[in-house]
Amino acid sequence: MNRTTLSLIAGATALAAVTGFAALSAPDAPGAGVTAEAAAQLPVERTSLLCPSPSTSDLAETSYTSFTPVTKGTESGGKAELQAAAVESADDSGAGGDQGGNGDRKSGKEKTEKPVLTPKEPGKPVTGDSSGSDTPALVGTADGRFAPGWTVQETTEVAAGTGRGLQGVNCTAPDTDFWFPGAGTAADRTDYVHLTNPDDSAAVVDIELYGKDGALQSTVGEGITVQPHSSEPVLLSTLTDEQQTDVTVHVNVRSGRVGAAVQALDDKLGGDWLAASTDPSGSLVLPGIPKDATSVHLVAFTPGDADADLKVRLASPSGPITPAGHETVHVKGGMTTAVDLGDVTRGEAGSLVLTPTDRSVPVVAALRVVRGKGERQETAFIPATRPVGTRATSADNSAKGSTLSLTAPTSTATVEVTASAGSEGGTPVSKTYTIKAGTTQDIEPPVPSGLKGTYALTVEPKSGGPVYGARTLASTEGGVPGFTVQTLPDDRGPSRYRRRTRTCRCSRSRPGDRFRPVSALVLPVPRIHRLRRQPEQLGDLLHDDLVHERRPLVAALGADLDRPPVDHHARGAPLAGADRAAERHRLVVPRLAGPVEPWHLQDQEIDVRELWPPPLQALHGVLHQIRERVRAARGERHLRRCDRAAHAPAVAITTAGPAGGGSGRHGLVHHW
């Protein structure tokens, strides 16, 4: 079943909940209204992070830094911890083997080990370290007050050998789809894609490689099984016989979910982690190119069949600049395109901004950046990223060697940067900066008063347009200018769930009354992988820990389902702008000028029945069962909006098709 169909399933489920809980009523006499209060933004209650195994070098020295910003509205409880990825079940002969004996295993997993890191309180970083080549991948969970904005940085120094230098990566949330432009399978490259499974069931993953002429032939990249609570590094050069310097890697998860990151190592140019590019989009921002970069290499790929033509602009401290000889770049559909921009920054801070010349075609992109000359060169990667959003967090900063780069590509913005307390002491400090439109500013971030240890930075836009950011760590070792760059997308802290409310007037329903939703909630509702599971509440279909990918969906919901979210997603920021239209699954009514918005339902400009797209016809039997069983459970045919309980009882949902009495794929029958 493809992604679009799964997204539509989630939409159908949400609309079914609407049908079950909404009421048919007419306004009562004046004065009988009750106005519900608008729900405030709520903090995330639970989150997961996955850290890949840092290195295969015996000379590797790795540090971990965990930090949760202080977030208003959180409760006093909760915890966060990072644990080594466990070995799979005893009777599984896959990777990991039988370590520790069967006597240490319970319910198919090893005996719980002591956490590697356990933060004590939000607002103060906690650190840990390891050395050598046997450091395992880590699986982390946080809940309660530790969940909103939880960030973990993994930083490794390798003194010599392939990939020597400074390598850094932000531990990522599990997901089902990743794009990595900028990897390689050439003879002088040793690139691994690390897959980490946090769940209790195995994940099945496909890895696709795309070179300059299209897809690279490979059969061993299909159906890779990642055992529960384990990590699997896959050497890209073993997936194909073709050797290419610039390759785009697509990681697609058939079942389950994983964390994914590419470790790109070069025999001569060092190496670093390549994080996933943001979702394919017509416009991209790649922030934080170091001002002393000696080489900037752009790698772009468009997943579809259509070609993309992009304008190339450098947002410099003085404004946007067009690189001479590289005004535009043509990206052929399904093929990886590489452009060498040279020393494009010319000694100034910069961010690369890609926009369509005409028609918008979704693209992914990343930069390979080199510092130094001759034998003393080091490499880092900058993928296209999402904007800072509400807040972004960067851990593992020191008094020297940290640079914060911020860019405002469209309009001037004001941001507040806060330096946290140090891991071993210090007082937080905040400072406000103004980033002019079309510029990039390298900022020496504020340092906590009386700093001891490392500290974290939070970036919060206060006004103006979108802001993109990156943090660079630099450390010179043996004359080699080691560095690593991490982008700063939204840290998934405060939730964006906000409910619009209207006056609720209660009266007995009449058969001819139109559907009038009490409130509307704009939800980034995703495709939900495991609809076969029986939900504890209908609300779990919208806010479930199994939600792995968010797409905008407008649904009319009552107060019953106004629940705080229990998980987040790495790409949870709402998609916006016409450039991402191809990636949306928005509800659209042909007679409206644009996508459906909450007020269209509230003001009765459209009827909810107009929202049915043809692919949902096969689900009509499911929706009918949801509605009828909710009604039966409540013991009433038509629910009165002001009298309903806080939550409806749990109901079992079974699929009804042509053989089971449902409407089937054809011949839609409305049960309204």
Image: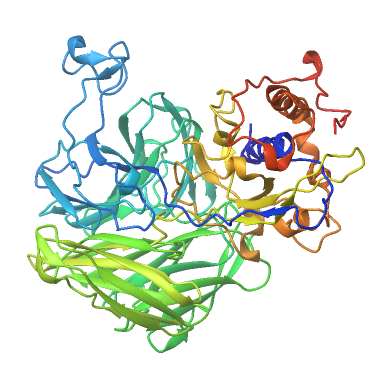
- 70 versus 240 height, above or below: below
Of residue 586 and residue 305, the one placed in the foreground of this image is 586
Q: Is residue 93 above or below residue 226?
A: above
If the image is split into quadrants, where does the C terminus sit? Answer: top right
Tell me if residue 391 can be seen.
yes
Horizontal side, residue 118 vs residue 387: left or right: left
Q: With 627 as the anchor, is 293 left or right in this view? A: left
**Can you see residue 306?**
no
Instruction: Give how far across and how far down residue 142 sits, in percent.
Output: 31, 42
- In this view, the residue in front, 323 or 51, is 51
Q: Residue at x 66, y 44 (%)?
A: 558
The quadrant of the image that shows the N terminus is top right
- Left or right: residue 464 compared with residue 291: right
407 left or right of 187 in image: right
Q: What residue sits 34% from the left and 49% below the top?
A: 186
Residue 47 appears in which quarter of the rendering?
top left
From the top left corner, tell me how far across and down residue 366 is, in percent. 42, 61
Q: In the image, residue 221 lies at what x, y percent? A: 45, 33
Q: How is the image coloured?
A: rainbow
